[in-house]
Amino acid sequence: MPANSELTHMTEDILKASIRGERLAQKEFYNFFKGKMFVVCLRYAKNREDAEDMLQEGFIKVFQDLHQYAGAGSLEGWVRKVIVNVALQHLKKQQRLLPTVEFDNLEISDNTDQELPHLDEPIAKNLIHILHQMPDGFRTVFNLYVMEGYTHIEIAEILGISVSTSKTQYLRAKAYMRKMLAKSLTT
């Protein structure tokens, strides 16, 4: 298994032991990734409790499928892909992706190598709060397009919607985000 940047902080031994199902190694593996993956879950969830459920279900799936990680691409990207897929399944189970709400009334690319700007905690919390207020369809398309790097064609396929619906949801999500950010800046 080729070394990658995550393995410099987490030993390959922990990865191999996690694959074998050793609980202490899995705990270390979980602790290494839980913070970043919880933020991913928060972006898709309506509230903190849903995000915690998504995270728990996601790591169960990660450990079930960890033997499939072949070392191609980053380990964090692979874990993120599993977590996002679980989050989408969670939303589908709750039938919260569609129908969409009107605004006036609402394969994952491995972009983990890109440096994201550091946000102050209050700004990040405000953005997460705005995401939580977004209708589910807006939030899901926004996350898949902006944060995960999917194309509208891929989003349409994943969610079982048309490409134009994906584009419309994204445009409405941007307008919603803009409106809520402007509102938060004036209050």
Image (cartoon, helix red, strand yellow):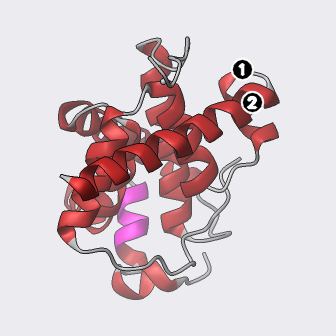
Between residues 92 and 61, which one lies in front from this camera angle?
92
Q: Which label number is shown at residue 42?
A: none
Characterize the magenta stretch by its predominant secondary structure: helix
Residue 142 position in % (x across, y down): 55, 44
Residue 66 position in % (x across, y down): 49, 52
User: Mark 1 = which residue?
Assistant: 160
Residue found at x 26% / y 45%: 129
User: Mark 2 = which residue?
Assistant: 156
**Amino acid, disc 1:** Gly
Label 2 environment density (alpha carbons within 10 Å; few <14, some 14–19, many ≥20): some
Residue found at x 44% / y 81%: 7
Q: Is residue 91 above or below residue 15?
A: above
Q: Is residue 81 above or below residue 53?
A: below
Between residues 160 and 129, which one lies in front from this camera angle?
129
> In the image as oriented, which residue stretches furthest toward the front?
186
Does residue 137 appear in the picture of this structure?
yes
Q: Is residue 184 left or right of residue 180?
A: left
Between residues 113 and 166, which one lies in front from this camera angle?
166
